[in-house]
Image (spheres, rainbow, N blue to C red):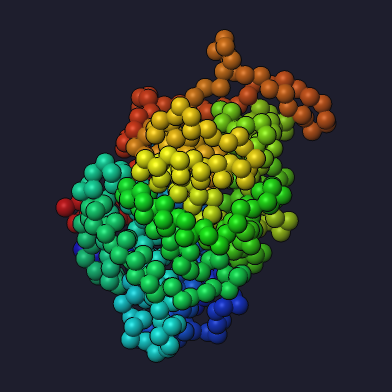
Protein backbone atom coordinates (compact mmCIF):
# COMPACT_ATOMS: atom_id res chain seq x y z
CA UNK A 1 0.00 0.00 0.00
CA UNK A 2 1.43 3.37 -0.97
CA UNK A 3 2.62 5.76 1.67
CA UNK A 4 1.14 9.23 1.37
CA UNK A 5 2.89 10.86 4.31
CA UNK A 6 6.32 9.29 4.37
CA UNK A 7 8.13 10.58 1.32
CA UNK A 8 11.78 11.53 0.97
CA UNK A 9 12.93 15.13 0.91
CA UNK A 10 15.72 14.93 -1.59
CA UNK A 11 15.25 18.04 -3.71
CA UNK A 12 18.25 20.17 -2.84
CA UNK A 13 16.80 23.43 -4.08
CA UNK A 14 13.82 22.98 -1.79
CA UNK A 15 15.95 22.14 1.21
CA UNK A 16 18.30 25.01 0.63
CA UNK A 17 15.44 27.44 0.22
CA UNK A 18 14.27 26.48 3.68
CA UNK A 19 17.70 26.39 5.29
CA UNK A 20 18.03 28.56 8.38
CA UNK A 21 21.80 28.86 8.49
CA UNK A 22 22.89 30.24 5.15
CA UNK A 23 26.50 30.75 6.15
CA UNK A 24 26.97 27.02 6.52
CA UNK A 25 25.17 26.01 3.33
CA UNK A 26 26.17 26.33 -0.27
CA UNK A 27 23.50 28.21 -2.17
CA UNK A 28 24.55 27.30 -5.70
CA UNK A 29 21.73 25.88 -7.84
CA UNK A 30 21.47 22.15 -7.28
CA UNK A 31 18.06 21.18 -8.59
CA UNK A 32 19.66 19.49 -11.58
CA UNK A 33 21.84 17.17 -9.49
CA UNK A 34 20.75 13.55 -10.01
CA UNK A 35 19.56 11.85 -6.84
CA UNK A 36 22.28 9.23 -7.27
CA UNK A 37 24.93 11.91 -6.73
CA UNK A 38 23.41 13.58 -3.68
CA UNK A 39 24.82 11.07 -1.21
CA UNK A 40 28.25 10.66 -2.75
CA UNK A 41 30.07 13.09 -0.44
CA UNK A 42 29.92 14.05 3.22
CA UNK A 43 29.58 17.71 2.26
CA UNK A 44 26.47 16.99 0.18
CA UNK A 45 25.00 14.86 2.92
CA UNK A 46 25.58 17.58 5.50
CA UNK A 47 23.58 19.89 3.26
CA UNK A 48 20.74 17.37 3.34
CA UNK A 49 21.01 17.24 7.14
CA UNK A 50 20.91 21.04 7.44
CA UNK A 51 17.96 21.20 5.07
CA UNK A 52 16.17 18.54 7.11
CA UNK A 53 16.60 20.64 10.24
CA UNK A 54 15.19 23.65 8.40
CA UNK A 55 12.26 21.62 7.08
CA UNK A 56 11.50 20.42 10.58
CA UNK A 57 11.41 23.90 12.06
CA UNK A 58 10.45 26.23 9.22
CA UNK A 59 7.60 24.53 7.39
CA UNK A 60 4.22 26.24 7.50
CA UNK A 61 1.18 24.02 7.27
CA UNK A 62 -0.88 26.99 8.41
CA UNK A 63 -0.15 30.03 10.56
CA UNK A 64 -1.23 27.99 13.58
CA UNK A 65 1.18 25.19 12.65
CA UNK A 66 4.65 26.69 12.16
CA UNK A 67 6.94 23.69 12.04
CA UNK A 68 8.14 21.75 15.06
CA UNK A 69 6.86 24.40 17.47
CA UNK A 70 3.37 23.13 16.59
CA UNK A 71 4.05 20.13 18.83
CA UNK A 72 5.36 22.26 21.68
CA UNK A 73 2.45 24.72 21.60
CA UNK A 74 -0.12 21.92 21.39
CA UNK A 75 1.41 20.29 24.46
CA UNK A 76 1.28 23.59 26.34
CA UNK A 77 -2.32 24.30 25.34
CA UNK A 78 -3.52 20.90 26.55
CA UNK A 79 -1.95 21.23 29.99
CA UNK A 80 -2.72 22.80 33.35
CA UNK A 81 -1.36 26.31 33.32
CA UNK A 82 -2.12 27.98 29.99
CA UNK A 83 -5.54 29.64 29.86
CA UNK A 84 -6.15 30.11 26.15
CA UNK A 85 -8.14 33.08 24.92
CA UNK A 86 -10.53 30.91 22.96
CA UNK A 87 -11.76 33.53 20.52
CA UNK A 88 -8.22 33.85 19.18
CA UNK A 89 -6.88 31.91 16.20
CA UNK A 90 -4.42 29.12 16.82
CA UNK A 91 -4.77 26.57 19.60
CA UNK A 92 -8.39 27.11 20.63
CA UNK A 93 -9.24 23.52 19.66
CA UNK A 94 -6.26 21.90 21.40
CA UNK A 95 -7.07 23.67 24.67
CA UNK A 96 -10.57 22.11 25.08
CA UNK A 97 -9.38 18.72 23.76
CA UNK A 98 -11.29 18.93 20.49
CA UNK A 99 -8.13 18.91 18.40
CA UNK A 100 -8.83 15.41 17.10
CA UNK A 101 -10.92 17.12 14.43
CA UNK A 102 -8.10 19.41 13.29
CA UNK A 103 -6.70 17.38 10.41
CA UNK A 104 -4.36 20.19 9.36
CA UNK A 105 -2.55 20.04 12.69
CA UNK A 106 -2.61 16.25 12.90
CA UNK A 107 -1.17 16.04 9.40
CA UNK A 108 1.45 18.69 10.15
CA UNK A 109 2.81 16.91 13.23
CA UNK A 110 2.84 13.47 11.62
CA UNK A 111 4.39 14.71 8.39
CA UNK A 112 7.14 16.72 10.06
CA UNK A 113 8.24 13.86 12.29
CA UNK A 114 8.16 11.16 9.63
CA UNK A 115 9.78 13.21 6.89
CA UNK A 116 12.61 14.04 9.29
CA UNK A 117 12.88 10.32 10.06
CA UNK A 118 13.02 9.44 6.36
CA UNK A 119 15.73 11.97 5.58
CA UNK A 120 17.72 10.74 8.56
CA UNK A 121 17.28 7.17 7.33
CA UNK A 122 18.79 8.19 4.00
CA UNK A 123 21.73 9.84 5.74
CA UNK A 124 22.34 7.01 8.20
CA UNK A 125 22.25 4.28 5.56
CA UNK A 126 24.38 6.13 2.97
CA UNK A 127 26.96 8.18 4.86
CA UNK A 128 29.44 5.32 5.40
CA UNK A 129 29.92 4.86 1.64
CA UNK A 130 30.30 8.59 0.92
CA UNK A 131 33.59 10.36 0.38
CA UNK A 132 34.95 12.53 3.18
CA UNK A 133 36.93 12.27 6.36
CA UNK A 134 36.00 9.73 9.01
CA UNK A 135 35.60 12.59 11.49
CA UNK A 136 33.13 14.45 9.28
CA UNK A 137 31.12 11.33 8.54
CA UNK A 138 30.95 10.46 12.24
CA UNK A 139 29.62 13.94 13.02
CA UNK A 140 26.91 13.75 10.34
CA UNK A 141 25.82 10.22 11.19
CA UNK A 142 25.73 10.95 14.91
CA UNK A 143 23.58 14.04 14.37
CA UNK A 144 21.21 12.16 12.06
CA UNK A 145 20.84 9.34 14.59
CA UNK A 146 20.04 11.81 17.37
CA UNK A 147 17.56 13.72 15.20
CA UNK A 148 15.82 10.47 14.26
CA UNK A 149 15.70 9.53 17.94
CA UNK A 150 14.12 12.89 18.78
CA UNK A 151 11.36 12.30 16.22
CA UNK A 152 10.61 8.84 17.56
CA UNK A 153 10.71 10.18 21.12
CA UNK A 154 7.97 12.64 20.21
CA UNK A 155 5.95 9.93 18.51
CA UNK A 156 6.26 7.59 21.49
CA UNK A 157 5.34 10.40 23.88
CA UNK A 158 2.17 11.69 22.23
CA UNK A 159 0.66 8.75 20.36
CA UNK A 160 0.44 6.29 23.23
CA UNK A 161 0.24 6.35 27.02
CA UNK A 162 3.28 6.08 29.26
CA UNK A 163 5.79 3.31 28.67
CA UNK A 164 5.49 2.58 32.39
CA UNK A 165 1.78 1.85 31.94
CA UNK A 166 2.30 -0.77 29.23
CA UNK A 167 5.55 -1.23 27.27
CA UNK A 168 3.74 -3.56 24.87
CA UNK A 169 1.16 -0.99 23.83
CA UNK A 170 1.31 -0.21 20.13
CA UNK A 171 2.04 3.39 19.19
CA UNK A 172 3.34 4.20 15.70
CA UNK A 173 5.15 2.45 12.81
CA UNK A 174 8.94 2.20 12.79
CA UNK A 175 10.94 2.90 9.62
CA UNK A 176 14.72 2.62 9.68
CA UNK A 177 15.44 2.52 5.95
CA UNK A 178 14.60 5.08 3.25
CA UNK A 179 11.08 4.97 1.81
CA UNK A 180 9.67 5.82 -1.60
CA UNK A 181 6.22 6.70 -2.86
CA UNK A 182 5.44 3.00 -3.42
CA UNK A 183 6.80 1.76 -0.07
CA UNK A 184 4.28 -0.41 1.73
CA UNK A 185 3.14 1.07 5.02
CA UNK A 186 4.02 -0.72 8.22
CA UNK A 187 1.84 -1.55 11.23
CA UNK A 188 2.29 0.14 14.57
CA UNK A 189 5.17 -1.02 16.74
CA UNK A 190 5.17 -1.39 20.50
CA UNK A 191 6.54 1.26 22.81
CA UNK A 192 9.21 -1.22 23.86
CA UNK A 193 10.43 -1.57 20.28
CA UNK A 194 10.34 2.18 19.70
CA UNK A 195 12.29 2.98 22.87
CA UNK A 196 14.79 0.23 22.03
CA UNK A 197 15.44 2.04 18.74
CA UNK A 198 15.64 5.44 20.46
CA UNK A 199 18.16 4.27 23.05
CA UNK A 200 20.21 2.48 20.40
CA UNK A 201 20.30 5.58 18.18
CA UNK A 202 21.35 7.80 21.05
CA UNK A 203 24.00 5.37 22.25
CA UNK A 204 25.53 5.34 18.77
CA UNK A 205 25.25 9.13 18.53
CA UNK A 206 26.99 9.49 21.90
CA UNK A 207 29.97 7.54 20.56
CA UNK A 208 30.07 9.25 17.17
CA UNK A 209 29.81 12.79 18.56
CA UNK A 210 32.24 12.40 21.44
CA UNK A 211 35.00 14.29 19.62
CA UNK A 212 32.77 16.85 17.87
CA UNK A 213 32.84 20.48 18.98
CA UNK A 214 30.21 22.73 17.45
CA UNK A 215 30.83 26.44 16.84
CA UNK A 216 29.49 28.66 19.63
CA UNK A 217 26.86 30.26 17.41
CA UNK A 218 25.37 27.00 16.13
CA UNK A 219 23.33 25.63 19.01
CA UNK A 220 20.96 24.15 16.47
CA UNK A 221 23.61 21.55 15.70
CA UNK A 222 23.42 18.41 17.80
CA UNK A 223 26.50 17.81 19.91
CA UNK A 224 27.23 15.41 22.76
CA UNK A 225 25.40 17.66 25.24
CA UNK A 226 22.18 17.51 23.21
CA UNK A 227 22.53 13.74 22.94
CA UNK A 228 22.93 13.45 26.71
CA UNK A 229 19.85 15.65 27.15
CA UNK A 230 17.80 13.45 24.83
CA UNK A 231 19.05 10.39 26.71
CA UNK A 232 17.98 11.98 30.00
CA UNK A 233 14.47 12.60 28.63
CA UNK A 234 14.28 9.07 27.27
CA UNK A 235 15.41 7.38 30.46
CA UNK A 236 12.97 9.51 32.47
CA UNK A 237 10.15 8.27 30.23
CA UNK A 238 11.03 4.59 30.67
CA UNK A 239 11.81 4.70 34.37
CA UNK A 240 15.58 4.29 34.33
CA UNK A 241 15.98 6.89 37.03
CA UNK A 242 19.71 6.62 37.73
CA UNK A 243 20.58 6.86 34.05
CA UNK A 244 18.22 9.82 33.61
CA UNK A 245 19.97 11.71 36.40
CA UNK A 246 23.43 10.77 35.16
CA UNK A 247 22.82 11.87 31.55
CA UNK A 248 21.09 15.07 32.66
CA UNK A 249 24.13 15.99 34.71
CA UNK A 250 26.39 15.44 31.72
CA UNK A 251 24.11 17.46 29.44
CA UNK A 252 24.08 20.59 31.57
CA UNK A 253 27.64 20.74 32.88
CA UNK A 254 28.72 23.41 30.38
CA UNK A 255 25.61 25.61 30.64
CA UNK A 256 25.37 27.99 33.59
CA UNK A 257 22.03 29.27 34.85
CA UNK A 258 20.99 32.53 33.26
CA UNK A 259 21.03 35.78 35.21
CA UNK A 260 17.84 37.47 36.42
CA UNK A 261 18.11 40.08 33.67
CA UNK A 262 18.44 37.34 31.07
CA UNK A 263 15.35 35.64 32.48
CA UNK A 264 13.41 38.84 31.81
CA UNK A 265 14.78 39.37 28.31
CA UNK A 266 12.17 37.30 26.50
CA UNK A 267 13.43 33.73 26.00
CA UNK A 268 14.32 34.61 22.44
CA UNK A 269 18.13 34.38 22.25
CA UNK A 270 20.10 31.31 21.23
CA UNK A 271 23.21 32.66 23.00
CA UNK A 272 21.55 32.43 26.43
CA UNK A 273 23.95 30.60 28.76
CA UNK A 274 21.33 28.00 29.75
CA UNK A 275 20.33 27.00 26.24
CA UNK A 276 21.76 23.64 25.23
CA UNK A 277 19.75 23.32 22.02
CA UNK A 278 17.63 25.72 20.01
CA UNK A 279 16.67 27.03 16.60
CA UNK A 280 17.93 30.42 15.52
CA UNK A 281 15.85 32.98 13.66
CA UNK A 282 16.55 36.11 11.66
CA UNK A 283 14.37 38.51 9.67
CA UNK A 284 14.72 36.71 6.35
CA UNK A 285 14.35 33.22 7.88
CA UNK A 286 11.74 33.55 10.59
CA UNK A 287 8.96 30.99 10.10
CA UNK A 288 9.37 29.45 13.55
CA UNK A 289 9.24 32.92 15.11
CA UNK A 290 5.52 32.96 14.35
CA UNK A 291 4.99 30.90 17.48
CA UNK A 292 5.74 34.05 19.50
CA UNK A 293 2.41 35.47 18.29
CA UNK A 294 0.78 32.95 20.62
CA UNK A 295 3.31 33.01 23.48
CA UNK A 296 4.02 36.75 23.62
CA UNK A 297 1.22 38.40 25.59
CA UNK A 298 2.99 41.67 26.44
CA UNK A 299 4.37 43.07 23.17
CA UNK A 300 2.05 45.32 21.19
CA UNK A 301 3.20 43.65 17.98
CA UNK A 302 2.11 40.18 19.07
CA UNK A 303 -0.94 39.32 16.97
CA UNK A 304 -2.81 36.57 18.83
CA UNK A 305 -1.45 36.80 22.42
CA UNK A 306 -3.59 33.81 23.36
CA UNK A 307 -1.34 31.93 25.80
CA UNK A 308 -2.41 33.67 28.99
CA UNK A 309 -1.67 32.12 32.38
CA UNK A 310 -4.15 30.39 34.65
CA UNK A 311 -4.43 32.59 37.79
CA UNK A 312 -3.94 29.47 39.91
CA UNK A 313 -0.53 29.07 38.30
CA UNK A 314 0.61 32.34 39.88
CA UNK A 315 -0.16 30.97 43.35
CA UNK A 316 2.56 28.32 42.93
CA UNK A 317 5.31 30.98 43.15
CA UNK A 318 6.87 32.59 46.23
CA UNK A 319 6.59 36.36 46.33
CA UNK A 320 10.37 36.80 46.22
CA UNK A 321 10.80 34.43 43.24
CA UNK A 322 12.23 36.36 40.29
CA UNK A 323 9.63 34.73 38.03
CA UNK A 324 6.72 36.42 39.84
CA UNK A 325 7.64 39.75 38.23
CA UNK A 326 6.60 38.33 34.88
CA UNK A 327 2.93 38.29 35.95
CA UNK A 328 0.56 41.22 35.40
CA UNK A 329 -3.19 41.60 35.01
CA UNK A 330 -4.12 42.74 31.52
CA UNK A 331 -6.03 46.03 31.30
CA UNK A 332 -6.33 46.36 27.53
CA UNK A 333 -9.83 46.43 25.97
CA UNK A 334 -11.06 42.94 25.21
CA UNK A 335 -8.38 41.45 27.47
CA UNK A 336 -9.27 42.91 30.86
CA UNK A 337 -8.66 40.46 33.67
CA UNK A 338 -6.49 37.99 31.83
CA UNK A 339 -3.22 37.13 33.56
CA UNK A 340 -0.18 37.85 31.43
CA UNK A 341 2.96 35.81 31.97
CA UNK A 342 5.57 37.79 30.05
CA UNK A 343 8.18 35.07 29.73
CA UNK A 344 8.35 35.17 25.92
CA UNK A 345 8.78 38.38 23.94
CA UNK A 346 9.46 39.19 20.33
CA UNK A 347 12.74 40.89 19.57
CA UNK A 348 12.57 44.32 17.98
CA UNK A 349 12.83 42.77 14.50
CA UNK A 350 9.80 40.50 15.12
CA UNK A 351 11.86 37.35 15.48
CA UNK A 352 12.61 35.06 18.37
CA UNK A 353 14.92 32.06 18.65
CA UNK A 354 13.25 28.81 19.69
CA UNK A 355 14.41 27.11 22.87
CA UNK A 356 14.48 23.29 22.69
CA UNK A 357 16.60 22.28 25.70
CA UNK A 358 17.93 24.11 28.77
CA UNK A 359 20.18 23.27 31.67
CA UNK A 360 17.40 23.99 34.19
CA UNK A 361 15.32 21.20 32.64
CA UNK A 362 18.29 18.88 33.11
CA UNK A 363 18.62 19.93 36.77
CA UNK A 364 14.98 19.01 37.31
CA UNK A 365 15.52 15.65 35.61
CA UNK A 366 18.41 15.05 38.01
CA UNK A 367 16.17 15.94 40.94
CA UNK A 368 13.33 13.72 39.75
CA UNK A 369 15.62 10.82 38.91
CA UNK A 370 17.10 10.85 42.40
CA UNK A 371 13.69 11.29 44.03
CA UNK A 372 12.14 8.36 42.21
CA UNK A 373 15.22 6.32 43.12
CA UNK A 374 14.55 7.18 46.79
CA UNK A 375 17.67 9.35 47.20
CA UNK A 376 15.72 12.28 48.62
CA UNK A 377 18.74 14.19 49.93
CA UNK A 378 20.26 14.39 46.46
CA UNK A 379 16.87 15.15 44.92
CA UNK A 380 16.31 18.13 47.20
CA UNK A 381 19.88 19.29 46.64
CA UNK A 382 19.23 19.69 42.91
CA UNK A 383 15.74 21.09 43.41
CA UNK A 384 17.13 23.75 45.72
CA UNK A 385 20.02 24.50 43.39
CA UNK A 386 17.51 25.70 40.82
CA UNK A 387 15.28 27.40 43.38
CA UNK A 388 18.25 29.34 44.66
CA UNK A 389 19.03 30.49 41.13
CA UNK A 390 15.46 31.84 40.89
CA UNK A 391 15.55 33.35 44.40
CA UNK A 392 12.74 31.04 45.47
CA UNK A 393 12.25 29.68 48.98
CA UNK A 394 14.34 26.56 49.52
CA UNK A 395 12.54 23.27 49.95
CA UNK A 396 12.84 21.56 53.33
CA UNK A 397 12.99 17.78 53.45
CA UNK A 398 11.94 17.64 57.09
CA UNK A 399 8.75 15.62 57.44
CA UNK A 400 8.44 15.03 53.72
CA UNK A 401 7.77 11.71 52.00
CA UNK A 402 9.17 10.50 48.72
CA UNK A 403 5.91 11.41 47.00
CA UNK A 404 6.00 14.88 48.55
CA UNK A 405 9.43 15.48 47.02
CA UNK A 406 8.38 14.13 43.62
CA UNK A 407 5.30 16.36 43.67
CA UNK A 408 7.43 19.42 44.51
CA UNK A 409 9.76 18.67 41.61
CA UNK A 410 6.86 18.27 39.18
CA UNK A 411 5.45 21.62 40.32
CA UNK A 412 8.86 23.19 39.80
CA UNK A 413 8.87 21.80 36.26
CA UNK A 414 5.55 23.55 35.64
CA UNK A 415 6.96 26.81 37.01
CA UNK A 416 10.29 26.74 35.23
CA UNK A 417 9.32 25.17 31.90
CA UNK A 418 6.00 26.97 31.27
CA UNK A 419 5.49 27.55 27.57
CA UNK A 420 8.38 25.33 26.47
CA UNK A 421 6.30 22.33 25.42
CA UNK A 422 6.36 20.00 28.44
CA UNK A 423 2.83 20.32 29.85
CA UNK A 424 1.07 17.44 28.11
CA UNK A 425 4.16 15.26 27.87
CA UNK A 426 4.58 15.41 31.67
CA UNK A 427 0.90 14.57 32.19
CA UNK A 428 1.24 11.53 29.92
CA UNK A 429 4.53 10.22 31.28
CA UNK A 430 3.48 10.59 34.94
CA UNK A 431 0.01 9.12 34.27
CA UNK A 432 -1.61 12.08 35.96
CA UNK A 433 -4.72 14.08 35.15
CA UNK A 434 -5.00 17.63 33.86
CA UNK A 435 -5.53 20.00 36.78
CA UNK A 436 -7.70 23.01 35.94
CA UNK A 437 -9.54 24.61 38.83
CA UNK A 438 -11.84 27.62 39.08
CA UNK A 439 -10.32 30.85 40.39
CA UNK A 440 -13.13 31.92 42.70
CA UNK A 441 -13.49 33.58 46.09
CA UNK A 442 -14.96 32.03 49.23
CA UNK A 443 -18.46 32.72 47.88
CA UNK A 444 -17.81 30.88 44.66
CA UNK A 445 -17.59 34.07 42.62
CA UNK A 446 -14.71 35.02 40.30
CA UNK A 447 -11.90 36.76 42.16
CA UNK A 448 -11.79 40.52 41.53
CA UNK A 449 -8.46 41.98 40.40
CA UNK A 450 -7.25 45.51 39.72
CA UNK A 451 -6.11 46.30 36.18
CA UNK A 452 -4.64 49.45 34.69
CA UNK A 453 -6.44 50.68 31.58
CA UNK A 454 -4.67 52.38 28.65
CA UNK A 455 -5.49 55.83 30.03
CA UNK A 456 -3.72 54.98 33.30
CA UNK A 457 -6.75 54.56 35.52
CA UNK A 458 -7.31 51.52 37.69
CA UNK A 459 -10.33 49.29 37.34
CA UNK A 460 -11.73 46.33 39.29
CA UNK A 461 -12.66 43.39 37.04
CA UNK A 462 -13.23 39.67 37.28
CA UNK A 463 -10.08 37.61 36.89
CA UNK A 464 -10.30 35.61 33.67
CA UNK A 465 -9.65 31.94 34.22
CA UNK A 466 -9.88 28.55 32.57
CA UNK A 467 -12.93 28.16 30.37
CA UNK A 468 -12.50 24.40 29.97
CA UNK A 469 -12.67 22.42 33.20
CA UNK A 470 -13.88 19.09 31.80
CA UNK A 471 -13.49 16.91 28.73
CA UNK A 472 -15.77 17.59 25.75
CA UNK A 473 -18.14 14.81 26.82
CA UNK A 474 -18.66 16.52 30.20
CA UNK A 475 -16.61 14.05 32.24
CA UNK A 476 -13.90 15.04 34.71
CA UNK A 477 -10.23 15.03 33.81
CA UNK A 478 -8.66 11.66 34.59
CA UNK A 479 -5.26 10.00 34.06
CA UNK A 480 -4.61 8.09 30.85
CA UNK A 481 -7.53 9.56 28.94
CA UNK A 482 -7.68 9.06 25.16
CA UNK A 483 -8.33 12.79 24.93
CA UNK A 484 -4.65 13.37 25.73
CA UNK A 485 -3.32 11.38 22.79
CA UNK A 486 -2.55 12.74 19.35
CA UNK A 487 -4.49 10.98 16.61
CA UNK A 488 -2.98 9.54 13.45
CA UNK A 489 -4.15 11.81 10.59
CA UNK A 490 -6.86 10.53 8.31
CA UNK A 491 -4.55 10.85 5.29
CA UNK A 492 -2.22 8.25 6.81
CA UNK A 493 -5.11 5.95 7.74
CA UNK A 494 -6.34 6.19 4.16
CA UNK A 495 -3.01 5.24 2.58
CA UNK A 496 -1.47 2.85 5.11
CA UNK A 497 -3.99 0.04 5.51
CA UNK A 498 -1.48 -1.92 7.60
CA UNK A 499 -1.18 0.64 10.36
CA UNK A 500 -3.70 -0.97 12.72
CA UNK A 501 -2.89 -4.61 11.96
Q: At 44% across and 29% down in the image, what residue appears?
A: 400
Look at the image and tell me whether residue 353 can be seen: no
Horizontal arrangement in the rendering, residue 320 relative to residue 22 (left or right): right
Residue 71 locus on image (x, y percent): 45, 51
Q: Residue furthest bottom?
A: 131
The residue depicted at 37 percent of the width and 40 percent of the height is 374
Quadrant position of residue 166: top left
| Residue most extreme to the left | 501
Which quarter of the figure has residue 254?
bottom right
Residue 9: % across, % down = 40, 72
Quarter of the rendering occupied by the N terminus: bottom left
Q: Is residue 418 above or below residue 96?
A: below
Q: Is residue 354 above or below residue 205?
A: above
Question: Where residue 74 appears, x then y in whole percent?
Answer: 46, 45
The residue drawn where x is 72% and y is 23% is: 450
Q: Position of residue 443 (x, y in %)?
A: 57, 9
| Image position of 172 (left or right of 63) | left
> In which image quadrant can residue 186 be found?
bottom left
Name the outermost residue toward the top. Answer: 443
* Relative to 497, residue 18 above or below: below
Q: Which residue does the image show at 24% across and 69% down from the upper left? A: 183
Report whether 290 appears left or right of 159. right
The image shows residue 1, relative to residue 292, as above or below, that is: below
Q: How many marks?
A: 0
Q: Is residue 224 left or right of residue 174?
A: right
Question: Toward the viewer: 46 or 239?
Answer: 239
Would residue 329 be visible to someone looking at this image? yes
Amino acid sequence: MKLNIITPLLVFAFLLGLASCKKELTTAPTDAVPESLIYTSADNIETVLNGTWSYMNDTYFSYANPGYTTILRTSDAMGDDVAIITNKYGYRDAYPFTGANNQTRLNAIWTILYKVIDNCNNIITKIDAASGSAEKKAQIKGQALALRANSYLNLATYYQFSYLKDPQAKAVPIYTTPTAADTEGKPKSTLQDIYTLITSDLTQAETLLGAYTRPDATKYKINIDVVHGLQARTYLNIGKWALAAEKAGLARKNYAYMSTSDYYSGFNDLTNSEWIWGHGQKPDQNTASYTFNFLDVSSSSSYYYSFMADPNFKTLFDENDIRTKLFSWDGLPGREGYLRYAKFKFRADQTGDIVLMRSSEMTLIQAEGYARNADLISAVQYLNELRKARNSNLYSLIGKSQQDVIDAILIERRKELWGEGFALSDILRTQSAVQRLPYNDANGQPVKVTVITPDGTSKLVNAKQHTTLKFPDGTAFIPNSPYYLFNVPQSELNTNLNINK
